[in-house]
Amino acid sequence: MKKFSLSIIVLFILLLSFAASAQLKTKVVIGKIYIDDGSMVFRADKYKPLADSLDKNIKVNPNDTTSLFFRALIYLWSNDIMAKPAQRTKGALEDLTIAKNMAEKANDLKMKDLRLKILRASLYKELVYRFTGDESWMFNSKQIAERKNLFNNYKLLANKYYDELVQLDPNNAYDYQKLKVQDNYPLNN
């Protein structure tokens, strides 16, 4: 009997350690959140199975804040590597908008994690970046006005969230202040 219960305890400990290691590891460096997998470069294909699994879980459990957070993080880093420096790369703005909505939903569901606050600020900063190029040849004046409005809203929110981070994490206030958006929309309508 003792041997059997000891086996169950060992199995339970192994399962717990496996479950803990299955979660995506993150780190915050200079005010930015990163996936901490030990590699130097984010490889989207490496995270495709995890992204698919998170997408399935979000369909079944739309209020799972952990899944929303990690899926938004994968969108951010996948977009960052795949889309920069071309602001109008197809899919970049759309993926960032999905990620922003996921992060906002996790926040609305009262997820209490500083990493979520950092992710939100990072997403809005990246959304602002999508509008900083000279787009005069692509859009008419009405579209430019709409894009300028989005730019200004995203900039306002990014800077608001960085200001909140300064209050929440004063030890890294300098990093958050440096990340605030200083750009202005490049076109007049």
Image (tube, grey):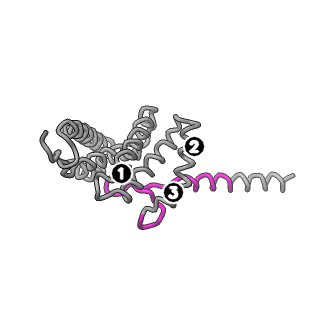
Quadrant of the frame with the C terminus:
top left
- Are discs 2 and 3 less than 8 Å apart at CB? no
The disc at residue 47 is 3
- How much space separates mark 3 and mark 1, taking CA atoms? 20 Å
The disc at residue 57 is none
Viewer-nearest residue: 6 or 177: 177
Kindly identify the amino acid type of the residue bearing the numbered disc 3: Tyr
Residue on which the image places disc 1: 90
Q: Which residue: 58% across, 56% down? A: 21
Residue on which the image places disc 2: 56
Q: Is residue 161 left or right of residue 148?
A: right
Local crowd at mark 1 within 10 Å, few (<14), some, or many (≥20)?
Answer: few
Kindly identify the amino acid type of the residue bearing the numbered disc 1: Lys
Where residue 165 appears, as percent x and y from the top left, is 31, 43
Please identify the quarter of the rendering in which residue 11 is found: bottom right
Furthest residue toward left? 188
Local crowd at mark 3 within 10 Å, few (<14), some, or many (≥20)?
Answer: some
